[in-house]
Image: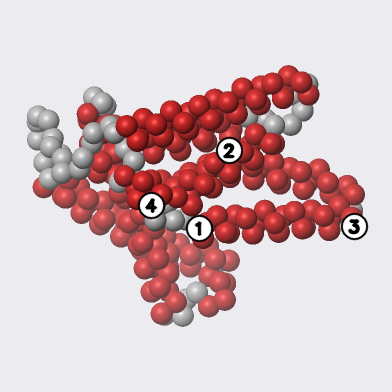
Amino acid sequence: MLMREFAFDLHELVKLWLALSAGATAIYCVDWRIQAAVLLMCLAACLCVGAWRFVAWLAALMAGLALAAVILCRQWPGAAPLAQASYYFLLKFGPLVAMAVFLGACLNVGRLLRSLERLGAPAGVVITLGACLRFLPTAAAEFGQVRHAMRTRGLNAGGRLWLRPDRLLGYVLVPLLLRSLAVGEELARAAVTRGVEAPGRKTSLHGLDFRPADGLTLAGWTLALAALIALDGALRGGSGGVA
């Protein structure tokens, strides 16, 4: 509980840096041990914000892949490269998914936008980013409502609807598009009502001060990733670039 509160109270720019730096490190590094270490760091961050279901799901997925790889390699030795490629893909892109879950669980969009404004980011960039971050969860909720309406009318029995592109277009995509347009209009009116077009500096109810805990978290995370990058370079040089 204490770690959860600590993670939620972090500065929004620090949270964004944690996600971006971890994703970039996972993409850059080659050695699988370094990628596994980055993934563990990202999963620890997910646990701090209470995303234990995602961590459990990913652990079950990796255990299942390991079991399937053992069985396949015993039956067909030629399947070893496929199993290795699957794990490499998971270690490479798993941190990106984990940090997306982390941001989705603890990122406050309002505080992030106000922080970017304080840094002098262009208004067009801030408004566009804010619209995207606020629209995507709403679009996902609208898709859930469309699916619920389809189930109520018996239009998704057995999932056969997804095999009919014509019905998929009429029953899912068109209602979702119309609802998305309506939601976009609502977001635009809400932004104008809150003075998004008004000149001058905006005020905020959120505390945007950079605390010592934010600096320590930022420094510790960055140093850990820098050490992993340096270690990956050393391992890469010692093994001739073999992952």
What residue appears at the point 84 percent right and 49 percent down from the top-left corner?
79
Crowd tier of the residue under label 1, counting other residues whose Cα lies within 10 Å: few below 14, some 14–19, many 20 or above: some
The quarter of the picture where the N terminus appears is bottom left
Q: Secondary structure at mark 4?
A: helix
**Disc assigned to residue 38:** 2
Q: Kindly report the distance in space between the C-alpha atoms of the residues bearing marks 3 and 4.
A: 48 Å
Q: CA distance from mark 3 to mark 1?
A: 35 Å
Up/down of 19 relative to 118, above or below = below
Q: Residue at x 26, y 26 (%)?
A: 119
Q: 6 and 172: which one is in front?
A: 6
Q: Which amino acid, mark 2?
A: Val
Give the left or right position of residue 61, taking residue 135 as reference: right
Q: Earlier in the sequence, mark 2 or mark 1?
A: 2
Q: Residues within 10 Å of mark 4 (few under 14, many from 20)?
A: few
For label 2, the SS is helix
Image quadrant where residue 13 sits:
top left
Residue 126 vertical placement versus 7 (above, below): above
Q: Give percent across and percent down for residue 5.
A: 35, 50
Q: From the image, tell me which residue sits under label 3.
A: 75
Q: Is residue 76 left or right of residue 120?
A: right
| Amino acid type, label 4 | Leu
Q: Position of residue 112 (x, y in %)?
A: 29, 39
Mark seen at residue 52 = 1
Rendered position, 42 above or below 30: below
Q: CA distance from mark 2 to mark 3?
A: 32 Å
Q: Of circles 2 and 3, which is in front?
A: 2
**Which residue in the protein does label 4 denote?**
2
Q: Residue 243's x, y, as percent?
A: 74, 31
Of callouts 2 and 4, the N-terminal one: 4
